[in-house]
Amino acid sequence: MKRHATPLFRELLTLFPCVAIIGVRQCGKTTLLQELPNNWKTYDLEKGSDYDQIAKDPDLFFRLNRAHVAIDESQQLPDIFPALRVAIDSDRQQTGRFVITGSSSPDLLHAISESLAGRVAILELSPFNLAEACAKPPSSFFQAINETDSLAKLLTLQPRVELPQLFNYWLQGGYPEPWIKNQTRFHKLWMQNYTQTYIDRDILQLFPGINRQKYRLFIQMLSHLNGTIINYSEVSRALGVSQPTVREYFQIAHGTFIWRHIPAYEKNASKRIIKHPKGYLRDSGLLHYLLHLNDLDSLIAHPQMGRSWESMVIENILRGLAAQGISHDYYHYRTGGGAEIDLVLEGEFGLLPIEIKYGQKITSKSLRGIRDFVRERQCPLGIVINNAERVTQYEENLVGIPFSCL
């Protein structure tokens, strides 16, 4: 199954001495390494013999292996990063020499930025987005919003995925292995083992002093906090731990790529803004497993349905932008009066508010929040992602786009 990030990965190898592929466990990082030419050597630091070969003397290893070396799960050996810096600096102008991957480690980015700043390009890989899961090429939506005549190009978008496929993706999530196996029973068992491994191996290994039972309860609580404004004091009381501990738990979940922290958009505020962050579990399949939602009927009838849909669409948009290498920041927006924008993007394309609706019929009243945001901040465009049958232009600078176009 082809990944949309592959062209970006190849491009980065022509520009930087080293490329770091980061992302949640089991999202396809090791598989992406198979895109490398045959003359590359790959070492897996979770394999004892490979670990010992490098750990004995990392500097000597890189003197013997000066280029075309890929190191999987590099966070297992922190000593590798200063040695890699020395190796890169020995021939700074040569590109495409090393690839490293890493997962489930908040310290990984710190180690990369501390030792390899300016020497490495970072590519974040996620589980499948909708188009990847349905074997579709990247949507032109992402390039369209990055161009000057974006509205005209967005109006030409066509649905690319049938609703049954779309809803199956929403229910199942995007982790590659369950998609490849394509068995309901396997999906359930895989999620069970994945969650257990994440807590009992990855988290305990990275944070030996963490209270496993409290953190396990916290992960379960995240499924109910999905898509909500986060109040740390309330979570602290519910868990029976201090606020600093709760903040640390959120940082761990975000740093290990299972939770996405979305800050509030506070710039140029003319109204009272809710400044608390928002967040969601990054994979809808993991969310539904934790909520014990095993079929579409249960999902659609569940009180969390709307927030599940919203978070799944937001994650797909952010995954698509990352795969195209489009630089951006992301926020949520809510005023004290109740006006809300689900996703606010800011990048080279300017300021882009995106509202997400589950239904296909959109009323003028429901567009008031995004209409006011566009007018007050003079945004060139506002987008409403919905389940309509075709793209609809509501107003001069407000367009509705079916999620199936993405």
Image (cartoon, grey):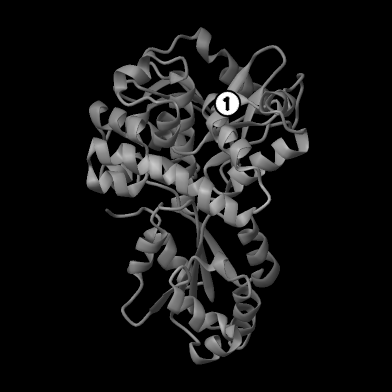
How many numbered discs sit on the rendered protein? 1
Q: Residue at x 58, y 71 (%)?
A: 77
Residue 121 at x, y = what percent? Answer: 55, 65
Q: Could you say which quadrant of the image residue 104 lies in?
A: bottom right
From the top left corner, tell me how far across and down residue 1 is, in percent: 27, 53
Q: Residues within 10 Å of mark 1 (few under 14, many from 20)?
A: many
Up the image or down, 111 lies above or below 281; here it is below
Circle 1 SS class: helix
- Going by the numbered disc 1, the residue's amino acid type is Leu
Q: Is residue 353 visible?
A: no
The C terminus, quarter of image: top left
**Is 144 placed left or right of 245 in the picture?**
left
Judging depth in this view, the residue of 80 and 265 nearest the camera is 80
Q: Nearer the viewer, residue 262 or 247?
A: 247
Residue at image position (37%, 60%) is 6
Please name the residue shown 41% across and 29% down the image: 288
Q: Is residue 113 visible?
A: yes
The residue indicated by pointer 1 is 225
Side (left or right) of 137 relative to 28: left
Up/down of 4 relative to 281, above or below: below
**113 shown above or below 170:** below
Nearer to me, 168 or 61: 61
Residue 320 percent across, percent down from the top left = 43, 45
Which residue: 46% across, 68% down? 46
Q: Nearer the viewer, residue 104 or 117?
A: 104
Residue 141 figure quarter: top left
Q: Is residue 125 left or right of residue 228?
A: left
Coordinates of residue 41 in the picture (x, y in percent): 39, 80
